[in-house]
Amino acid sequence: MDWVVFVVAGAAVLAGALGVILSTHPVHSALMLVMTLFGVAVLFVAQQAHFLAAVQIIVYAGAIVVLFLFVIMLLGVDRSENVSSEPLVGQRPVAYLAGIGVIAAIFLLARTAWVSGAASVAGAADGPGSNVEKLARSLFTRYLLAFEMTSVLLVIAVVGAVVLARHSPSGGVRGSEDAG
Amino acid sequence: MGDPLYADGINQAVILIVLGKLLVVFAFLMVSVLFMVWFERKVISDMQSRIGPDRAGPWGLLQTLADGIKLFFKEDLLPDRADRRVFHLAPYLSIVPAFAAFAVVPFGGTISIAGHRTQMQLADPPVGVLFLLAMSSIAVYGIMLAGWASGSKYPLLGSVRASAQMVSYEAAMSLAVAAAVLSAGSLSTRDIVNSQGVYRWNLWILGVVPFVVYLIAATAETNRPPFDLVEAEQELVGGFHTEYSSISFALFFLAEFMNTVTVSAVAVTLFLGGPNGPHIGFLPDLWPVVWFLGKLLCFLFVYVWFRATLPRFRYDQLMDLGWKKLIPLSLYWLLLIAALRIGRDQGWAWYYVLGGGVAVGAVAWGGLNAALRQGDAVRTAA
């Protein structure tokens, strides 16, 4: 049963990933990315990581890719890319070489513990309470500082984005003042 | 906890029961959509002193069915500049989340089928509430892609409006839902229902604010009036589904009403005690379902009432309401409930906690108002 789920979800992930790079259309690529994210979420559920699966869908599929699509639609770049042109000379062979290198590295690293689709045994979360409770407990006790730092970082990023995008009282976007 | 059905492992009988439940939930949603369309038209007719549909079947009950059959036999048009694949995919993307979200709603107690105990709900995952939020966050795809794939102006404008609106109100809705999670101490929808008594609903436990925020945000999420800017007929022809016809249009229609039923069912689960109700001697398995359906019907009536009563929002009013009022309010309320809860656990006097909470709230409210006024001043000066 585990094995069937793993194969189906894995096929969805791979098909989605191939779709992202093979589609010539940005919107199709984004949709294929959503398919990959769903496959990964199913794999998380198979590993009993329910919280991660839900957050994967809410944050990545529900927010980030929606933002991608939003930008693609608003900027009107939704036309097919010409993939045959090569802006950088020799980028294609280099990309092939790098890809082969990464795959070789993955195979090399995975040799000792090959993926099987079986539920996690190494990091089994034991003790009482659900998966969410354990995650919450470690986030808000042991890793509290890191957690709060991350949230502060995100707030700073939001404030920074607002300041950069804000129209200054004298008119025009800040940063374009030197030009005009 | 989870469903007792899976306690003894999974065998053929268990799979059959799950398939049976799936069928029941699907049939229920379909019938409820048929009913809801008729109910909405009839109630609005009554409010406007009209008769409404009364030709097909008794009291016009079969009107929706007749409309559905008509739509099936119409020609399925494909606009010239449409993106063929995405255009055909979009209706399904909008109907699947509407259906899937209903899967975690408990609509009855625990019953016995052929010696197996099972909960009357399709699935009870330990992260049920997050599943609901996930489904509501991917519901935007159907509308967004429908508008874009049509390759025409008005649908695109409609879908851009829709995605901005749905993303904006999702935050307020999540914060309101988080309040219910806080009171139950669990993300499972069944646990949330069980944490509420027969009359001791989250509606009262949490103060009425999260419920009201959820009601408004859910109306906006489903793009129902007064938040139906997505398909504002005077401005956008038909909105995102202008170019759709035949069965694709029927699917969007179905998804919209299914969404209405689903968010109402979720509201009943989170705030109105779900299938909880007074125990009655005979047919003990039936009454929870009756209570659930009764509460659901009250909720659906409120939605129709909104539509008949309230004029449509202007776009800036919509965004102001979402970002400047609902999100700060529900965030503050969530913090206040959390503070009161910690105070209870630590044995602090509740009036100190409440006083402190109100003081902090007043300062925050003042600060927010000052910031908004400053922002307005800067904008008018520019």
Image (cartoon, coloured by chain):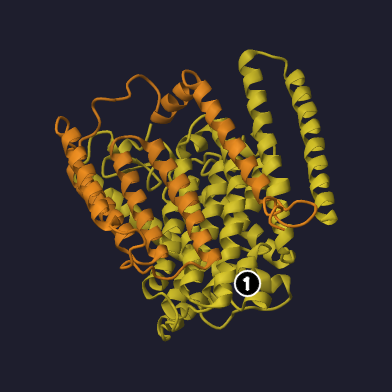
Chain colours: A orange, B yellow
Residue nearest the viewer, comparing B292 with A43 = A43
Whether residue B294 is visible, yes or no, is: no
Label 1 sits on a secondary structure element that is helix
Q: Residue at x 42, y 73 (%)?
A: B87
For disc 1, the marked residue is: B42
Name the residue: 20% across, 41% down. Answer: A2
Q: Residue at x 56, y 47 (%)?
A: B268
Residue at the top extreme of this rendering? B347
Q: Where is residue B84 drawn, in percent x and y?
A: 38, 76
In the image, what residue occupies the spot 41% across and 43% down? A56
Q: Quadrant of residue A41?
A: top left
In-front residue for pair A109/B154:
A109
Taking B68 as reference, is B210 above or below it?
A: above
Image position of B32 with respect to B325: above or below: below
Spot occupied by residue B154 in the image (x, y as percentages of width and height): 58, 76
Furthest-left residue in this view: A111
Q: Is residue B40 left or right of residue B14?
A: right
Considering only vertical position in the picture, is B350 above or below B323?
above
- Give the amino acid type for the residue marked by disc 1 in the picture: Lys
Relative image position of residue B162 (x, y in whole percent): 58, 62
Q: Chain of mark 1?
A: B
Residue B213 visible somewhere in the drawing? yes
Q: Is residue B352 left or right of residue B217?
A: right
| Residue A34 horizontal/vertical position (percent) | 38, 54
State the residue in front, B177 or B377: B377
In front here: A75 or B126?
A75
| Quadrant that contains the C terminus of chain B | bottom right
